[in-house]
């Protein structure tokens, strides 16, 4: 039995949003069933890398939002292996972080992305959001 693994989670969701928000036709959505999460991660990384290359080619730079969590392991592992990527033309943003959590803490999303993505890209990315020192947000839950 084939298993469907959502190895690329938010990256696939963001790419799908980008793709479908610009479509003006009523074509059917294509669904691919892959044998394991490594293949899902590779397919998602290939798709995202091609989108980044296209955008950099057209606009000179790209912005990418990245997510964290176990669902991203295979996707990020495949993405960092894509050859000849213009990472120096890419600005990365991460979705969230725990307020008050030091970036060296094991649960830190900044640490996760630094270790699994940013530190492995060559050339280094144009900019990767990593600092929260200026955040003065408050949460009012009533």
Image: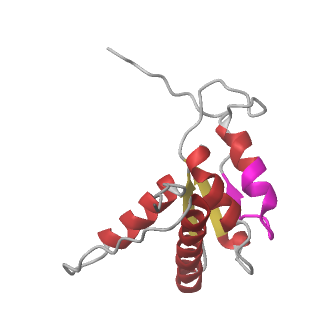
Name the residue: 21% across, 81% down.
Answer: 25
Residue 24, can we see it?
yes
Q: Is residue 48 magenta?
A: no
Residue nearer the viewer, 70 or 48: 70
Q: Which residues are magenta?
A: 115-128
Q: In the picture provided, is 120 more to the left or to the right than 95?
A: right
Foreground: 142 or 5? 5
Drawn side of residue 6 relative to residue 118, left or right: left
Please state the horizontal and vertical placement of residue 115, each as a whole percent of the image.
78, 48
User: Would you place residue 106 above or below residue 27 in this image?
Assistant: above
User: Residue 19 vs residue 65: left or right?
Assistant: left
**Residue sitting at x 39%, y 66%:** 16
For residue 87, which quarter of the picture? bottom right
Residue 108, image quadrant: top right
What sort of colour scheme is used for the picture? secondary structure
Furthest residue in direction top, as rendered: 142
Q: Quadrant of the C terminus?
A: top left
Across and down, in percent, residue 118 comes to 74, 56
Residue 103, horizontal then vertical, whole percent: 74, 34
Residue 140 at what x, y percent from top left?
39, 18
Residue 62 in the image: above or below residue 14:
below
Residue 124 within the segment the image draws in magenta = yes
Identify which residue is drawn at 43% across, 68% down.
33
């Amino acid at each position: 039995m084939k298993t469907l693994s959502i190895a690329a989670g938010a990256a696939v969701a963001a790419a799908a949003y980008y793709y479908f928000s610009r479509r003006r036709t009523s074509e059917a959505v294509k669904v691919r069933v892959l044998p394991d999460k490594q293949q899902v991660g590779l397919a998602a990384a290939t798709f995202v890398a091609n989108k980044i290359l296209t955008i950099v080619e057209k606009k000179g730079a790209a912005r990418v939002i990245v997510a964290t969590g176990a669902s991203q392991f295979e996707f990020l592992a495949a993405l960092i292996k894509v050859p000849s990527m213009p990472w120096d033309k890419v600005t990365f943003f991460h979705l969230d972080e725990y307020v008050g959590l030091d970036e060296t803490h094991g649960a830190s999303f900044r640490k996760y992305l630094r270790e699994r993505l940013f530190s492995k890209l060559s050339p280094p990315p144009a900019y990767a959001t990593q600092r929260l020192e200026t955040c003065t947000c408050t949460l009012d839950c009533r």
